[in-house]
Amino acid sequence: EGADDDEQMYEGEYQGIPHPDEIKEARRAARIEARRKARQAVQQEEVEENLPEQYETIMEDCGHGRFQWMLFFVLGLALMADGVDGFVVGFVMPSAEKDMCISNSDKGLLGLLVYVAMMVGALVWGGLCDKMGRRMCLIYVLTIDLIFSFLSCFAQGYGFFLFFRFCSGFGIGGSIPIVYTYFTEFLQMDKRGEHLSWLCMFWMLGGLYASFTAWGIIPHYGWGFAIGTEFQMHSWRLFILICLFPALAALVGVVFMPESPRFLLENARHDEAWMVLRRVHDTNWKAKGEPERVFTVTNIKTPQTQEDEFIEIQSDTGTAFQRWTVRHMTMLQQVMANIMSLSAPELRLQGLFLVIVWFCLAFSYHGLGVWFPDMIKYMQYEEYESKVRVFHRERVERFHFNFSLVNQIHREGEYIHDMFANIEIKSVKFEDSLFENCYFEDIKSTNTFFENCTIKNTIFYNTDLWQEKFKDCRMENTTFLHPKKGCHLNFQEENDIVIYMVSFLGSLAVLPGNIISALFMDKIGRIRIIGGSMLASSACTFLLLLSFSQGAVICWQCLFYGASVAAWNGLQVISVELYPSSKRGTAFGILNGICKLAAIIASFIFAAFIGITKIIPIFLAFSALVCGGLVALKLPETREKILS
């Protein structure tokens, strides 16, 4: 009695039963929160749908001018560095294998590991550039390539050389996905096809640069120095050093370039994106004589990303190592989520078609790229073998051999009290022969062997004739004094300038195809360029059946490269246009990794048939090109597509 009604206790409180008013209030709050989230989701969807159109309008307002051309040359140098790196190992190997005594199996291992490194680099850096930024990843890529390529110039052991080239390949392997993704996001729709195709020409310039410098430097084996017997700096090392210039110039240029504004917007960095777009606008219009033109964009719709908020929350707590671990583990999770999202139904079919076309084109292009120079070498070898001189049962006594022995076979000969001094022995085989009381001094040999010979009372002084050059030989009272360490190059045989000329002409042959694809990419469309180029290239492969001389092989090689380059250009353009900005680098990295995988498989298959038959390699290349060309016709046309 006398108690206030407001202070009366609800009888269910002691039993933990909520008051009916509390239940109503909770339900009301839940409904309000649900409506708020629904409105936010609708707004977010509208923002994401409107951002591509708004960004395209902004890029049209910024115009195409000085800024894009500066970025074009900087990124072109990065692409040129990748082109150079693709030729370096093939050009230096004939020299490096002599300096470091590399066996044929180890030589094949180097080429394999470099391609594997480039494949892994494309996958890793393609994914990271969608999370770390295009500019930052490109700086890392070029820096890694520069450091380890520079170290490989001075590596004296094969193990270190292999490791440094692997690391260099891992770096430069990521350049292609980043370069195309980066440049695409600074281009308006009606400029993309043409200017991305012009950018492809820098890969050709890389091949020309590598071929021309190798041609002028590597055969001059005397261009170098040695410190004792442990450190040697020969011309092929100088060639690697000069090949670093495009990557160095690209790195310096990228440092002064801004981040992609599209990437900044995708990661909710609105203010930074606005500053970059204003810089592009002002640079272009000042160069066009309209400095008074004002950048009028004040608001850019920006999608919000929960992942970035999570990273920032974690970065405010814990130790520096914990923050570093959380940030990078979160980034790895985001990259993996991006890769998995590429299997979404709307991307799955077009992704499968792209994979098939990339694989088929890379398989035939790189396979024939291995087959052409190896076929020329084989033809040279056959011609050389046809001129071999055979000496049978000759007896030479008390004679001084002061002239080189070249391309000879000596069977059942007898050499008594003979002297071999200050000469070169190239492609010579002694079979079932007797050497008694002979003296060998200052001998430099290449592809020279003694088989089933008897060697008595003989001295080998300062020669490079090692145990592996004596097969099933009987030695009695034979002495080896001051043997030469390492292997020694005979550049006249190993560094035939025809190989450099072949690579130079092959790179130059793509110029007409590059020009045609750039001029017509936006006029006839990407699909017709890709399909038509691949089908035309397949027809060119049949002409290889008519190649019975070195000149014919070089001619058909140039024709094939000139016809197929348009397909490469169209494929790279459509690959960056099909995928949304948040997944563009990841998708392109995967496709480029598949390209490297196809190159690895093709190099083994095509090399296996050298000297056996040319029908199978030609049939494989033809089938791959026809298959890829027909599948390419199923891809969606993207020349009128706004970057999503």
Image (cartoon, helix red, strand yellow):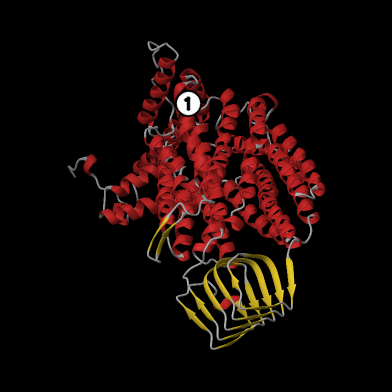
Say which residue appears at 21% left-offset and 43% top-offset: 7
What's the residue type where badge 1 is placed?
Answer: Gln
Residue at x 74% of width, y 61% of height: 387
Q: Quadrant of residue 454?
A: bottom right
Q: Which residue is mark 1?
A: 68
Looking at the image, which is closer to me, 425 or 165? 425
- Is residue 262 visible to the viewer in this orientation of the structure? yes
Q: Position of residue 69 (x, y in %)?
A: 48, 26
- Residue 582 seen from this side: no
Left or right: 470, with 371 as reference point:
left
Q: Is residue 519 above or below residue 415?
A: above
Front-lying residue, 369 or 446: 446
Observer-nearest of 604 and 333: 604
Coordinates of residue 277 in the picture (x, y in percent): 41, 25
Q: Residue at x 78, y 55 (%)?
A: 614
Is residue 99 depicted above or below 329 in this figure?
A: below
Is label 1 in a helix, a strand or a loop?
Answer: helix
Outermost residue to the front = 398
